[in-house]
Image: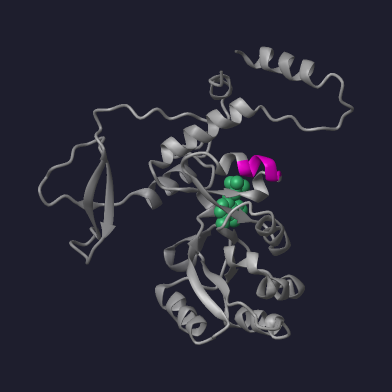
Amino acid sequence: MTPASDLRRYNTATAHLEPPFAVLDLAAMRANAESMARRAAGKPIRVASKSVRCRGVISRVLAMDGFRGIMAYTLPEALWLAGSRSSDDILVAYPTADSGALGRLAGDAAAAAITVMVDCPEHLDLIEKAIAGTAEPRPIRVCIDIDTSYIALGGRIRVGARRSPVRTPADAAALARDIAGRPGLRLAGLMAYEGQIAGVGDNPAGRPLYGRAIRRTHKFKAHDPANRYHVGDRVEIRESRPLSREKRWVVSKLVKSGHEEIPIVDPTAPEARTTAS
Ligand SMILES: Cc1ncc(COP(=O)(O)O)c(C=O)c1O
């Protein structure tokens, strides 16, 4: 199929509808989702509801292998998704100050599925205050938002959002200790999102310096004690004590040998959309 024949199909299928409306090619969506799951190589992908905005689509993707959990945009949306049993693992990715919704969260059984983002003690105070009026409040699951913007030259260059005041392991540990000391809260995890490299390839067209900076942040020198791995192998690495001036990582296992081709599909490319049968 070609983009032109796809368009003819969509036009025929929607000829009786009054615009505006949105069209989703479910076969193409499935092909793109399968391609993502393949590239994630076993790591579950959390579906970002803010980028999908349709519960039916979210449920279809979650029913596929390789996808687990929802990343929701707001707490009221997360409560709605939890109420409809869309997932048992819903993360609200942005710190919320919606006191009414926090109060509902504390009193709602379905809310055991929800985790909210936190980034400072004042925010913990706000959550505690918001749930104080709830009879027999459930513990609120919280996740620490870590700032991973790229900082160079001692802070003179910064690329990325000032997402959170939690920047260092010590910052995260202090906030984790604070959470552990509050009976109404449970620490469920840590989140770090490198927004500055989202959707940017390693070699963005017309931006050579940016590309170089991105490749630099992606380069890890890892020790291979038995000299077992080869150029082109895809491997898993783990952090270690400093092994040399630049080496802080060790190769722990082979994920895929460099001798096999790993097909990379760009989901936005017309060919990817036409792989759907
Ligand atoms: C925590 C987090 N993860 C992932 C995303 C990516 O969302 P998408 O690329 O679907 O817009 C965002 C976007 O802001 C985000 O804040």
Q: Is residue 57 magenta?
A: yes
Left or right of 146 in this view: 237: left
Q: Quadrant of residue 215?
A: top left
Which colouring convention does the figure follow?
A: one colour
- In the picture shown, does residue 90 fall above or below 95? above
Outermost residue, right direction? 18
Left or right of 202 in this view: 70: right
Number of numbered discs on residues: 0
Q: Quadrant of residue 85?
A: bottom right
At 22% from the left and 51% from the top, the residue drawn is 251
Q: Nearer the viewer, residue 273 or 249?
A: 273
Q: Nearer the viewer, residue 137 or 247?
A: 137
- In the picture shown, does residue 197 fall above or below 79? above
User: Which image quarter holds the C terminus?
Assistant: top right
User: Which image quarter holds the N terminus?
Assistant: top right
Give residue 239's position: percent from left, percent from top: 28, 61
At 73% from the left and 85% from the top, the residue drawn is 133
At 71% from the left and 43% from the top, the residue drawn is 54
Give residue 173's position: percent from left, percent from top: 43, 78
Give residue 33's position: percent from left, percent from top: 53, 35
At 69% from the left and 59% from the top, the residue drawn is 83
Q: Is residue 267 visible?
A: no
Q: Nearer the viewer, residue 46 or 194?
A: 46
Q: Is residue 77 magenta?
A: no
Give residue 181's position: percent from left, percent from top: 50, 87
Q: Is residue 41 visible?
A: yes
Outermost residue, left direction? 226
Q: In the rendered structure, which segment of residues is drawn in magenta?
A: 54-59
Q: Nearer the viewer, residue 110 or 114?
A: 110
- In the picture shown, does residue 117 fall above or below 138? above
Q: Main secondary structure of the magenta part?
A: helix
